Image (tube, helix red, strand yellow):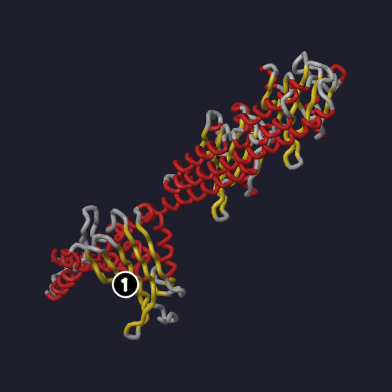
Amino acid sequence: MDQTTRASPVDALYRISSLAGKTGKTQEALQMILGEIVATFNAASGSIALINPDNGRLEIEVAHGLPQDAAQIELKPGEGVTGWVALHGKPLLVADVLNEARYFAVRDSVRAEMAAPMEDRGQVIGVVNIDSDSPAAFSEEDLKLLVLLTSEASKVARNLWLIQQLQTKASQLESVLNIGSRLVSKLELQEIIDSITVEARKIIGCRICAVFLANPEADTMTLYSVDGDSGAFRKLPPLPVNESSVGVALRRTRQIEVLELVKTEENLGVLEAIQNEGLVSLLASPIVFEGEVIGVLNAYTDHLHRFNNEEKRLFSTMASLGAVAIQNARLYKRVFESEEQLRLNERLNALGLLASEVAHEIRNPLTVIKLLFQSLDLEFPPEDPRSRDQAIIEEKLDHLESIVGRVLNFAKSSDDVHTRCSLRQIVQNTMLLMRLKLEQCRVRLSYEEPERPLTVEGSPGQLEQVVLNLIFNAVQAMPNGGDLHVELTSVTRQSVAWAELTITDTGCGIPDEIRERIFDSFLTGRHEGTGLGMAIVKRIVDSHHGNVEVLRSDASGTSIRLQLPLAHEEDAE
């Protein structure tokens, strides 16, 4: 062939090597590379075929001078000249395709062909192929030059792929950070799980994304959320863990990949849904929080797909973020259930307090009435009707006295159930319970505690109620957020060892008109308040032989101190 019609090999090599700096798009760069190679050899047609990692077949990525339907051709390794080069990793020159049994015709007028493997770190990733309509159009020197140009093209492609991967990773990392921020700000369980499926599907680019939550008692999984066009999947009943591919990830607590679901799925309901939706491959990541398997996050594709390590890491990260968000939602629910229980306990305590006060007030005049009645020393003959009336009055007075006694005993019975408990542990549990409430109310918590447990004699439930009540009051005094400082320490005053808890807020302070009577019943500074919280705190603390007092309260905030006597084996430092 006339060499004057060819482009300069040196110029072509330079232009190919400089492509990485001219374009950031791999497809565009490959098209330009093929154009340079075709021009260098004055070829009639050419193509660059890359190996699809999912099915291992050669697929034409870019072409020059080939029919439009050539892009649909897929070659197995070893099939055709291109497939042979990919399989063996060696270049090949065919002087006349009519005499070559390995030749696979794409264009009828082709007579000569050259092909060279594209390699990345010793692995064949594709093949560069050029054709001529004349026999013996290419020489062995041409083949060596094609190998050189293909090697340079492989370097350019690899660099562009690395750049794209870095850009994709940066984008994905930014997405994951944004997703994590949004997830932890959500507090409703269903809303969180729906967000997980939506965002995971966006990042992975799969057909369907689903979350199953575990039911440990029944050894089943329940579908909680699906993102993607999936009518069949949404109707799935709870699945036995041992009868589904998804259950493997749950049982083994590790990520699993299934290339062909229809060949491995055992559950008939899931298999039917898979077939109806045309799903092929699966990636399942367990949702685990502190060793507890909460559920499974699944990605389904509608084509054979081998998930790469990057996709697996991203999906695992999404599952981990989901685990934290789900656990936050559960804790948040517990906070409000505990708050509701606290309010109920307040009402019950208030009822007990009222009953106790009323019974106490009734007992005094009742005692006087009974004594006065007995002092009348009334005696009537048995046949006198008044004798029967006298007996009934005495009986009913005794009955009333018995009722008053039972009410008083009931009101104080709960205070008598005391045990040795760690005040430090009680405060720690309360801090954990209040964590989400504080975050929601934009309250910044600082907490100081001693190394010792600070053992006290008392009712753990009542003491936790006291701490919760004091913190709730502090939070409600800071409607726009603020700082809450909790300090637990031990002190000795007048030879008595005390555990001392100080709670300080930056709220609006206690109104002057009620500050001196803050522990009175039915006294409140809030419209929605019952006026019972601090009265109950005072009553519980008194029953524990402790003290509670307001140290300071002004426009800059309030500081309240709670003191409880330490158990005998605890000596104040």
Q: Quadrant of the C terminus?
A: bottom left
How many labels sit on residues? 1
- Residue 214 in view in this figure: no
In the orientation shown, which residue stands out farthest toward the top?
109
Mark 1: secondary structure? helix
In this rendering, would 280 be left or right of 142? Answer: left
Image quarter of residue 353: bottom left
- How far from the left and from the top, in percent, is residue 204? 57, 38
- Residue 64 lies left or right of residue 167; in this view the side is right
Furthest-bottom residue in view?
A: 495
Residue 556, can we see it?
yes
Query: Residue 428 occupies which quadrant of the picture?
Result: bottom left
Is residue 110 rendered to the left or right of residue 53?
A: right
Q: Nearer the viewer, residue 190 or 507?
A: 507
Q: Nearer the viewer, residue 278 or 536?
A: 278
- Toward the right, the furthest residue is 99
Disc 1 marks which amino acid? Ser
Q: From what the image shows, is residue 49 above or below residue 1?
A: below
- The one of 272 and 157 positioned closer to us in this rendering: 157
Label 1 Cα neighbours within 10 Å, binned few <14 / some 14-19 / many ≥20: some
Which residue in the structure is indicated by mark 1? 543
**Relative to 530, does residue 382 appear above or below in the rendering?**
below
Residue at left offset 74%, top offset 42%: 121
Residue positioned most to the front? 4
Q: Tell which of 73 and 94 is nearer to you.
A: 94
**Where does residue 390 sit, x and y in percent of width and height?**
16, 67
Residue at (36%, 78%) from the top-left corner?
498
- Percent coordinates x, y for residue 197 in the rendering: 52, 39
Position of the N terminus, as image quadrant, is top right
The quadrant in which residue 248 appears is top right
User: In the image, residue 507 lies at what x, y percent?
Assistant: 27, 60
